[in-house]
Amino acid sequence: MNFITFPEHQLRSFTYSVFKKMGCSDDHAELATDVLIKSDLRGIDSHGVARLSGYVRLWEKCRINATPDIRIVHETPTTATVDGDGGLGLVVAPFAMKVAIEKAEKYGSGWVAVKNSNHFGIAGYHALMAVEKDMIGISMTNASPLVAPTYSNERLLGTNPMCYAFPAGKYPPLIVDMATAAAANGKLEIAQRANKDVPNGWIQDKDGQNSINPNELKKGGSLLPLGSDKDHGSHKGYGLGATVDILSAVLSGANYGPWAPPFVSFLEPPSDPVGEGIGHFLGAMRVDGFRPAVDFKAHLDNWISRFKTAKAVEVGKKVIIPGEPEHEFEVERKINGIPVIDVVVNDLNLLAEKIGVAKLA
Amino acid sequence: MNFITFPEHQLRSFTYSVFKKMGCSDDHAELATDVLIKSDLRGIDSHGVARLSGYVRLWEKCRINATPDIRIVHETPTTATVDGDGGLGLVVAPFAMKVAIEKAEKYGSGWVAVKNSNHFGIAGYHALMAVEKDMIGISMTNASPLVAPTYSNERLLGTNPMCYAFPAGKYPPLIVDMATAAAANGKLEIAQRANKDVPNGWIQDKDGQNSINPNELKKGGSLLPLGSDKDHGSHKGYGLGATVDILSAVLSGANYGPWAPPFVSFLEPPSDPVGEGIGHFLGAMRVDGFRPAVDFKAHLDNWISRFKTAKAVEVGKKVIIPGEPEHEFEVERKINGIPVIDVVVNDLNLLAEKIGVAKLA
């Protein structure tokens, strides 16, 4: 595996040119680019430019609308449902989070369910929009079914991530951003490419037997919920995945459970939809709706200090503050550039050729 | 182990008489009783009358205030912080949930952080208060530190449960109510009493080595977060426990992390508190703030039907809908009574003798 390192601005302008070529408006192309590049900056390489050609393929199949009329279709002072009009989740979710933030500014909190959307990138991007306003940010999304609930071998849930982000004082924001499966699909893909076994407890084969072969997933196997098996609490991971599915899709009018349309263009969406597109759920709460922000931040700093200095079991493996590794990546990559693996660079250059924009390198 | 089965009303009147003897008002005694009995009815025996003498012992040590002045100390239209005045969490949390529901009735959603409280019983009780009003209910609480974050052998978090409850149509409410540790402390206590090993992945000893001996917990060991180890996502369980801790205690001004006071009377609270008591976080969102409640319920029924009929890996082990087993217990025990294990009956009768109320049996 070889990496080519690009300065941030170069990946940005390439990505922007691709979204413009899809027909996105300047604003949408810029926003979608920002979500993808933020992911690469933060070291979440699976969700950044590596996904760009996937979005284009869905657009080519008319499963992504590049010029959506994103709008509120139902609301109260602090709640709303947004119809994403089949647009990129990368622009639909920030629209919805802005609505949540505006409601929070007026009334203390704001909550927006989204239907008729697509993959929204990293959950953390949207939650961080609230943090910048001294709010607590919450974001979640349902996704293509890959995870089997406890006791079943049917894929009924996505890896359905949930994210909670909190503003700190002297430290970077504390961000819990996690798939509700034992392992995210990106980790499986890495093992598949490398032809390596995965830990027992990540997946099962099509008959529901535990497996360490990551390729079982392509043969009808499924990911396991966080907890891996009943003895270790897989019913909790299943319950969390269900919560994300219900808040994102049952509440908004999107497709839920096994009806969620696949993110990949080579799989067709179910022919009997129960809603529109996939769904998200976004929330913002003003910290000073509960106590002065300066007090909250001082205590969160104290929390972080205490956990950072917790006794370590092994020398060199310290307790990690959620969101800290991603922050360190961002600081470093803003200076030194973003390494992109050669297969992704090739994929992006083939894409450039196909749609007629300047190649990356 | 022998069980004695009591009709619901008998356990209720006994529990009420104990809370009255502590000096609770009629209303508070009735409410606290309802929370505990609901737990026993729903089959969560660890959190019902089995805990009654524990509450009394904390009251005897002046660590629970039987006549609290529970009040809102900070608010916006949809957020509030409640000071529980050291009262029973069993009455403080329902007070706070009422505030959240009232705000949701007016503005679509309501969110209340609580400080200066104590153990609030089952999280599900409070979340269900919202469900009765066709709202989505959310409840969480921090708790005595027993769980070590990934890579550490220090107990820095409680089992910190989170609960999400949704109103369904023809089915009972869907309720995800879960500790964020791999196993709840109640399960450890059962294994300790029976002198039985526990599954690998539930606990570690004081040095941070995995153990299957449940008694290690009494010798400085700790519970492991949901996920059990880093390979299986224990950092996610740790992140969820952190989220509950921050929303419940850092946001409200309660004690967080290792400063959370212990629920047991024989352990003293830390001498350097960072807040007041323990904290809770409660929320309510009107379903019809997003889409008509009748539509939401029809789709949640469809979700439940689909998951109930999912293919099973083993004959006889069907997919369980979160909250369904507890609902079945409640229906059955309302008719046939509540079985209480003999050691708890003895404990309650000793309590009755000590404080001077009529014995249970």
Image (spheres, coloured by chain):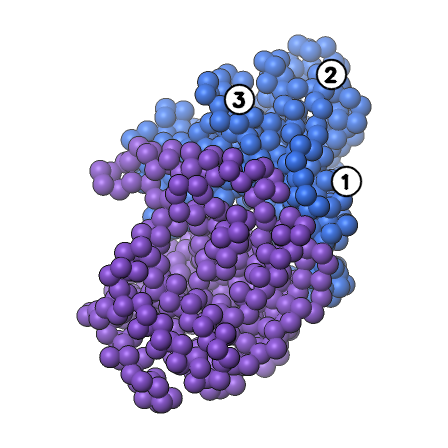
Chain colours: A blue, B purple
- Local secondary structure at mark 3: loop
Q: Which amino acid does label 3 sit on?
A: Val
Q: Which residue is at 47% across, 81% downward? A: B58
Q: Which of marks 1 and 3 is nearer the N terminus?
A: 3
Image quarter for residue A336?
top right
Q: Where is residue A303 in the image (x, y as percent from the top left)?
A: 63, 64
Q: Which residue has dot 1 on it?
A: A335
- Local secondary structure at mark 1: helix
Q: Which residue has dot 2 on it?
A: A23
Q: Which residue is at 44% across, 82% downward? A: B20
Alpha carbon distance from label 3 to label 2: 20 Å
Image quarter for residue B349?
bottom left
Q: Where is residue A220 in the image (x, y as percent from the top left)?
A: 36, 26
Q: Which residue is at 72% across, 53% downward? A: A108
Task: Write down the chain letter for disc 3.
Answer: A
Task: Write down the chain letter for disc 2.
Answer: A
Q: Which of marks 2 and 1 is in front?
A: 2
Alpha carbon distance from label 2 to label 1: 31 Å
Are marks 1 and 3 in one subunit?
A: yes
Q: Which residue is at 59% across, 56% downward? A: B101
